[in-house]
Amino acid sequence: MTHDDEVIGKAYDSRLMRRLMTYLRPYRSQVALAVVAIIGHSVLELAPPYLTKIVIDTYIPARDRSGLAGIAAIYLAVLTGSFGLEYLQTWTMQATGQRIMFDLRMQMMTHLHRLDLRFYDRNPVGRLMTRVTTDVDVLNDLFTSGVVSVFGDVFTLIGIMAVLVWMDWRLALVAFSVLPLIALITQWFRVNVRESYRTVRMWIARINAYLQERFTGMSTVQLFRREARDYDAFDEIDRRHRDANVDSIFYYAVFYPAIEFVSALAAALILWVGGGWVFDNALTLGALVAFLQYSQRFFRPISDLSEKFNVLQGAMASSERIFHLLDTPAEIEVGKRDRSTGRPLSDPGASVTSAPGTIRFENVTFSYGDGEPVLRNVSFDVHPGQRVGIVGATGAGKTTIVSLLLRFYDVQQGRITIDGVDIRDMDLLALRRLFGLVLQDVYLFSGTIASNIRLGDATMTDDTVRRALDAVHASTFVDRMPQGIDAPVVERGSTLSAGQKQLLSFARALAFDPRVLILDEATSSVDTDTELLIRDALTVMMRGRTTVAIAHRLSTIQDMDRILVMHRGELREAGTHQELLAARGIYHRLYQLQFESAAGIAAVRGA
């Protein structure tokens, strides 16, 4: 199976190029200024050799010092103007390239936020990081030193050819006689560099993916003493990347000296043929010197164009991958839409957000892939203010129910409704504002305690943050920190204990005052003392709210109004704790297993 990191595409794709050019449209004036500067610079570059010809053929034989002074002044003015125009072009295009990179990365970030979790299940994080960073950098090279500056190289080539033919078409043919050799060298370079570039890009993507995965799981790597094996595996990937770069260096090391050799060959032919014509007075010495200078300037843009071919090749490959990402449809739309027409609906669903009613699963069937369904014909109701627990063995489909309710995924059969309205017909942002979610694996971002509670909500005051922390007893450890709620939190909250992170996740959920509280194994990773604190906090949090709690510990959901028992993707039992025990079914067996396990542990501790 070929990954898109390995796809190199065409050397030039007009469809991709037209799309890339749309990013230049907001900066038309800057691009126009850069094009004028490039053309002006190319024109001025044609002047110095011809000025040299004038000096040698006219003013030096006549011993005209005033004429020499005038030409020297013009020469200096041309060089100054050339410097100024090159500076203007470089600064304008570099600044424009940075703005385009900014626009493109923000567009990609916006799109990545819209994509559903199924997309992230299929795509490694390292690959996505490569898209947003390395691939965008490649496009920056295209905009800053490729798509616009190529006009300067082409104009310079045409200008030099025109001047050479105008000065002496016969000697111009002599100079152009090496062009077939240039074409062969350039074609060899393009073919080999293209393959080398593909290999380098592929291994860069694999390095990013490998490092991201290993750094994220470093505790597991160290626990199972995988350092040596991981080092060897990374050594293999890194060595292949190094070798690919060395191969590309070889082609560059051959190409540029070869161009210089052909340039020297052209100069030798010009000296040999043109020198003889000078002896025969068929050519002036100044014209010969000018031809030599023009020939040296003629081959410089040829090598530059070959280098820009590599930039273009990289841009085509990177843009194809970037646009493939941007064209990936969001299976779950953020805006509320009519599912029959796909058009946005005018009603934002305010009635649902203001007073959520009955949550209903109607014959819901769902599968993450093409395999066995995770849920089969699941139907149940959750009434306003009701507390519902969901239990079952691992893989029974408990967490999937929550993912479908929050529309992280869409149901494949059946439907989920709130007050009779299919959640697929609701505004996604309004739907998710109804819920507060507390997961077993708490994710904290780098920042502060307060920023992890408010999550970017600028309207949330510090008092609201503190009240939420107090309600879940998290203030007991937050107040001990020197900076309180402004205490720094590192990535994933690695300096906090599991219990502290869990309490912060409760405070986060409570601070947003959700209508429906969802707890997914929220107390499974905390110690007994912390669990007692959380239970007390839950009493406050669940008051007046609809609650759906997933739990392995049956002790945490015994006092729920209703308990749903999942088994192999099906809803097998439902009722209160006492009703389910009396039925002596799956719930009764789970309860016995946990009770006997707890009793055995207690006996061992007592001994």
Image (tube, rainbow, N blue to C red):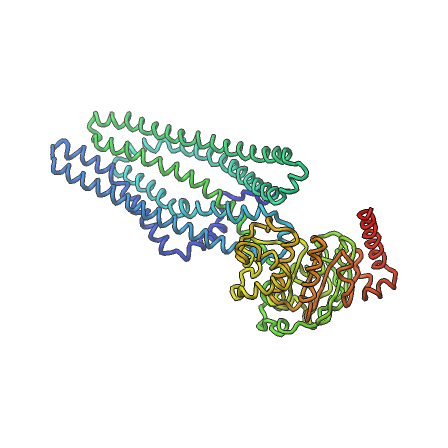
**Point 20% across, 31% down: residue:** 284
**Image position, residue 405 (x, y; %):** 68, 63
**Point 28% across, 43% down: residue:** 83
In the rendered structure, the answer to whether residue 244 lies left or right of residue 383 reads left
**Image position, residue 504 (x, y; %):** 62, 58
Whether residue 110 is visible to the viewer of this picture, yes or no, is no
Residue situated in front as seen by the camera: 284 or 555: 555
Q: Quadrant of residue 173?
A: top left
**Point 21% across, 25% down: residue:** 279
**Image position, residue 399 (x, y; %):** 71, 57
Q: Quadrant of residue 185?
A: top left
How many numbered marks, from 0 up? 0
Q: Quadrant of residue 560?
A: bottom right
Whether residue 13 is visible to the viewer of this picture, yes or no, is yes
**Image position, residue 44 (x, y; %):** 27, 43
Q: Is 156 drawn above or below residue 63 in the view shown?
A: below
Residue situated in front as seen by the camera: 136 or 370: 136
In the rendered structure, the answer to whether residue 539 lies left or right of residue 43 reads right
In the rendered structure, the answer to whether residue 464 lies left or right of residue 118 reads left
User: In which quadrant is the N terminus drawn?
Assistant: top right
**Point 35% across, 36% down: residue:** 300
